[in-house]
Image: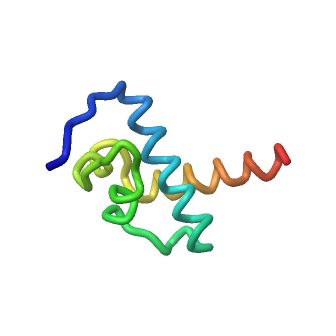
Amino acid sequence: MSTRVRMDPADRREVILQASVGLTRDRGSINSWSRRDVAGACNPPTSQETVKRYWLMPALREAVLTRLAMDRTRQ
């Protein structure tokens, strides 16, 4: 049984974004994951519906690309 974890919306969006970035790095492609994959990779656990509520997929993929580009410039 899962337990609900209440979070500030900005924090929840960040958790989802971090999970998406991790999946992209692990799989090597921005198009290699789905909303279901992202929900499963989130910590704390997140449902697919929560991912959908906070991010439309095109916006999430764009945010991942932006985050990866920012990380490259910091290195």
Check the image and name the residue furthest to the top: 8
Judge by depth and name the residue closer to the eye, 27 or 56. Answer: 27
- Quadrant in the rendering for residue 39: bottom left
Q: Above or below — where is 24 with respect to 7?
A: below
Q: Residue at x 55, y 68 (%)?
A: 30
Place of residue 64 in the rendered image (x, y in percent of width and height, measured from the top left):
57, 54
Residue reaching furthest to the left: 1
Residue 11 pos. (x, y %): 43, 31
In-front residue for pair 11/31: 11
Q: State the image coordinates of residue 3 (x, y, percent, origin top left).
A: 20, 40
Q: Left or right: 74 with respect to 11? A: right
* Residue beneath the point at 44% across and 70% down: 33
State the colouring used for the structure image: rainbow
Q: Position of residue 59 (x, y in %)?
A: 46, 52
In the displayed structure, would residue 66 be above or below residue 10?
Answer: below
Residue name at image x 32 percent, y 50 percent: 51
* Residue situated furthest front in the rendering: 1
Count the marks: 0
Please name the residue shown 85% across and 48% down the image. Answer: 75
